[in-house]
Amino acid sequence: MVNIILSGCMGHMGQMVTKAASQTDDVKIVAGVDKASGDPGGYPLYDDISKCAEKADAVIDFSAAAAVDSLLEYGRKTKTPLILCATGYSDEQLQRIEEASKDVAIFRSANMSFGISVLSQILKKNAAKLAEAGFDIEILEKHHNLKKDAPSGTALLLADAISSGLDEEYPYVYDRSKRSEKRPHNEIGISAIRGGTIPGDHDVIFAGEDEVVTFSHRAYSKAVFAKGAVQAARFMKGKGPGRYDMQAVVEASV
């Protein structure tokens, strides 16, 4: 059994993790942490992780970037692996996360989807072949109208996967409105669309002469990210200090 402490348990994603865990036989949420009150779903609720009396194999955090210091302190003190799913960390917070990973296992990915991680591996393996054959590279991402950042972290993750497989550096281009020129071949265009309730769509387009190859990922519900967090918790049980991500989960499942 994998016992989990769920930080941010009363939020939308926290409740999705609760549901995903309840549908997984070998996973159990033993405690939740949230400033909000209420019934999180059949487990005890604390307003601060330092008050948790329960022991766990991993902490899943879907709260906010501001909570990271208390989580890192808890992880270091108890040696409990941390799965950090919040967004918007500052450079200083990212540095503290990196430092803490020397003492405790820390899992962090730009996207918790298993499918996105597989897609990034495919892109890394095949991007150079298409680029050398003259294909231009564009990434189009679509998200709901409440998303504040653009481009998405996932779009950048996919761009980085492509870049790591290329033989030369391709700069990322986010806006062409201020230039009037033919498109250079050696660039990766990244475009963002915001509207409605789109959970997350990503298209990686390789446009060649008279043919187009498109790799697509559609998240029809944020539940895929909750399921990914539960998969990560199972993977992280018993892991020693270090940095881990969804790529490690994918590789372990092969």
Image: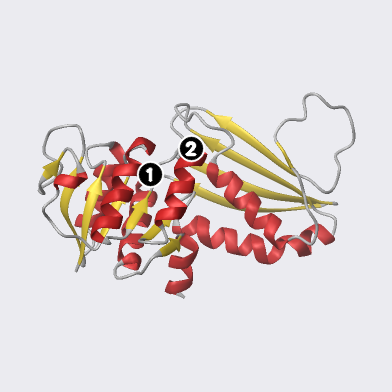
Residue 199, placed above or below residue 249:
above
Q: Indicate the quadrant containing the N terminus: top left, top right, bottom left or bottom right.
A: bottom left
Single out the residue that lies furthest toward the right. Answer: 181
On the picture, is 233 further left or further right than 32? right
On the picture, is 221 further left or further right than 22? right
Mark identifier at residue 90: 2
Where in the figure is residue 191, as x and y percent of width and height?
A: 65, 36
Type of amino acid at the residue the image marks with label 1: Lys
Circle 2: is it few (<14), some (14-19), or many (20+) Cα within 10 Å?
Answer: few
Quarter where residue 237 is shown? bottom left
Can residue 108 be seen? Answer: no
Circle 1: is it few (<14), some (14-19), or many (20+) Cα within 10 Å?
Answer: some
Residue 153, placed above or below residue 60:
above
CA gap, disc 2 to disc 1?
24 Å
On the picture, is 49 further left or further right than 106? left
The residue to which callout 1 is attached is 222
Mark 1: secondary structure: loop
Single out the residue that lies furthest toward the top. Answer: 178
Where in the figure is residue 147, as x and y percent of width and height?
A: 47, 30
What's the image's color scheme? secondary structure
The residue positioned 30% from the left and 47% from the top of the image is 71
Type of amino acid at the residue the image marks with label 2: Ser
Give whichever of discs 2 and 1 has the lower sequence position.
Answer: 2
Can residue 91 be seen? Answer: yes
